[in-house]
Amino acid sequence: MHTSLTHTVVAIYLLASVGVGLEVAFTAAANARGTGDLRLTGHSYAWMFPIYGLAYPLFALSWPVAGGLPWPVRGALYVVAIFAIEYAAGRLLRRVTGRCPWEDSYRASRWGIHGLIRLDYAAVWFVVALLFERLYLFLGR
């Protein structure tokens, strides 16, 4: 197990960068699908960098317990954890800034809960979580 502070900081930065990059790609694809705009304009929020960065320490805490479970079970557990973190982060951002950055698009969905999570994104989060798990393991836990 790598314990160096430098390794941890680099790993957090890499996972945060991948998360924000995937979010920009996802919002670009969703925008193109919804509007037909092929410029592929995507977006994220500066707040998302530290939120995605949480993935590394959370994998470090959960892997000793979850690592031996079958991948579908791990993926489902990760989705539940992601929804909890997304909900809590959205509430915190609402308290700190007056609004949650993603609440408008989440409120517009019938699958949205309080404008903070969207249940119809569970499959996307499942895939992203397992990708992040692979990155966590690749980085050498």
Image (cartoon, grey):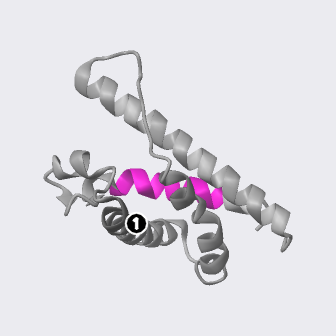
Q: In the figure, 25 relative to 80: above or below?
A: above
User: Residue 135's image quarter?
Assistant: bottom right
Q: In the figure, 55 relative to 42: above or below?
A: below
Left or right relative to 119: residue 135: right
State the quadrant of the C terminus.
Answer: bottom right
Magenta stretch bounds? 122-134
Pointer 1: residues within 10 angstroms few (<14), some, or many (20+)? some
On the image, the x and y values in percent for residue 92 come to 37, 69
Q: Residue at x 64, y 54 (%)?
A: 15
Furthest residue in direction front, as rendered: 97
Instruction: Tell whether position 123 is magenta.
Output: yes
Front-most of 91 and 67?
A: 91
Q: Residue at x 82, y 62 (%)?
A: 7
* Local secondary structure at mark 1: helix
- Main SS of residues in magenta: helix
On the image, the x and y values in percent for residue 53 come to 60, 60
Residue bearing the label numbered 1:
89
Q: Is residue 52 visible?
A: yes
Q: Amino acid at mark 1?
A: Ala
Q: Residue at x 13, y 52 (%)?
A: 110
Q: Is residue 138 visible?
A: no
Q: In the figure, 2 relative to 35: above or below?
A: below
Furthest residue in direction bottom, as rendered: 65
Instruction: Tell whether position 133 is magenta.
Output: yes
Left or right relative to 99: residue 49: right
On the image, the x and y values in percent for residue 8 come to 76, 65
* Circle count: 1
User: Residue 54's image quarter?
Assistant: bottom right
Q: Residue at x 61, y 84 (%)?
A: 65
